[in-house]
Structure formats: structure tokens, C-alpha cells
């Protein structure tokens, strides 16, 4: 997704589409719970797109005024099955 958004404002075409809206709300919990600052740097195009979509008044109305970002990424620990 990061490569696909390079130089683009929206996922498809030059206007916001349902694809942007759906993916924004899919990405929102990922940014708030899973992706910390170091990972966000690696996905700068996605972050720029996410913040641009979030600034749209109709989106901000339902998602809150300020995006909440994860400070520490979840650590997935591997365990052996019993």
C-alpha cells in the first residue's frame, strides 16, 4: 500500500472514493494499537494518506479530531501448543 500511494492523495483516482473511506477505518485501529513511530516512518506514504483522509471534515466527524497513534507496538510472543 505504501508503494501504491507514492505521489498520490487517494487510493484510486484524483478524488476520495469508498476505497479510501473503508481503508481509513481499517487502518485506524492498526495505527492506534500496532504501528509505532519507527514503523510509521517506514510507511510514510500511508501515513500521509491517512492523515490527509483524517483531515476531511466528514471523516473527522466520525473518527475523532486528533488521530491517536501507538507509542509501543504490540509484541507477539510465540508459544508452543500444549
Image: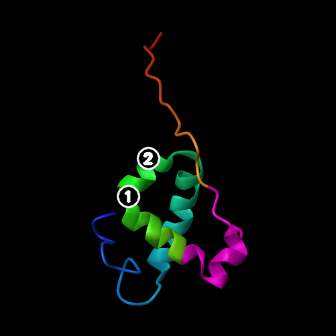
Residue 51 included in the magenta stretch of the image: no
The residue beneath circle 1 is 43
Callout 1: few (<14), some (14-19), or many (20+) C-alpha neighbours within 10 Å? Answer: some
The image quarter in which residue 41 lies = bottom left
Residue 66 included in the magenta stretch of the image: yes
Is residue 39 left or right of 31 when viewed as pictured?
left
Distance CA(mark 1)–CA(mark 2): 9 Å
* Residue 20 spot, x, y in % from top left: 47, 75
Q: Which of 45 and 21 is in front in this view?
A: 45
As helix, strand or loop, the secondary structure at mark 2 comes to: helix
Nearer to us of marks 1 and 2 is: 2
Please identify the residue farthest to the bottom as the structure is shown: 14
* Residue 18 spot, x, y in % from top left: 49, 80
Which one is earlier in the sequence, the residue at label 1 or at label 2? Answer: 2
Please identify the residue farthest to the left as the structure is shown: 3
As helix, strand or loop, the secondary structure at mark 1 comes to: loop
The residue beneath circle 2 is 38
The color scheme shown is rainbow
Callout 2: few (<14), some (14-19), or many (20+) C-alpha neighbours within 10 Å? Answer: few
The image quarter in which residue 7 lies = bottom left
Is residue 16 left or right of 54 when viewed as pictured?
left
- 37 is higher (above) or lower (below) than 81: below
Q: Nearer the viewer, residue 30 or 43?
A: 43
**Residue appearing at x 56%, y 39% in the figure:** 72
**Residue appearing at x 38%, y 58% in the figure:** 43
**Residue appearing at x 30%, y 72% in the figure:** 6
* Residue 33 spot, x, y in % from top left: 58, 46
Q: Nearer the viewer, residue 68 or 13?
A: 68
Which stretch did the figure color magenta? 53-68
* Residue 73 spot, x, y in % from top left: 52, 40
Q: Quadrant of the N terminus?
A: bottom left
Amino acid at each position: 500500500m505504501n508503494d501504491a500511494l507514492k505521489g498520490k492523495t487517494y487510493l484510486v483516482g484524483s478524488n476520495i472514493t469508498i476505497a479510501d473511506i473503508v481503508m481509513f477505518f481499517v487502518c485506524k485501529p492498526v495505527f492506534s494499537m500496532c504501528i509505532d513511530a519507527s514503523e510509521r516512518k517506514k510507511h510514510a506514504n500511508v501515513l500521509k494518506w491517512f492523515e490527509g483522509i483524517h483531515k476531511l471534515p466528514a471523516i473527522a466527524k466520525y473518527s475523532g479530531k486528533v488521530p491517536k497513534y501507538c507509542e509501543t507496538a504490540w509484541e507477539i510472543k510465540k508459544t508452543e501448543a500444549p
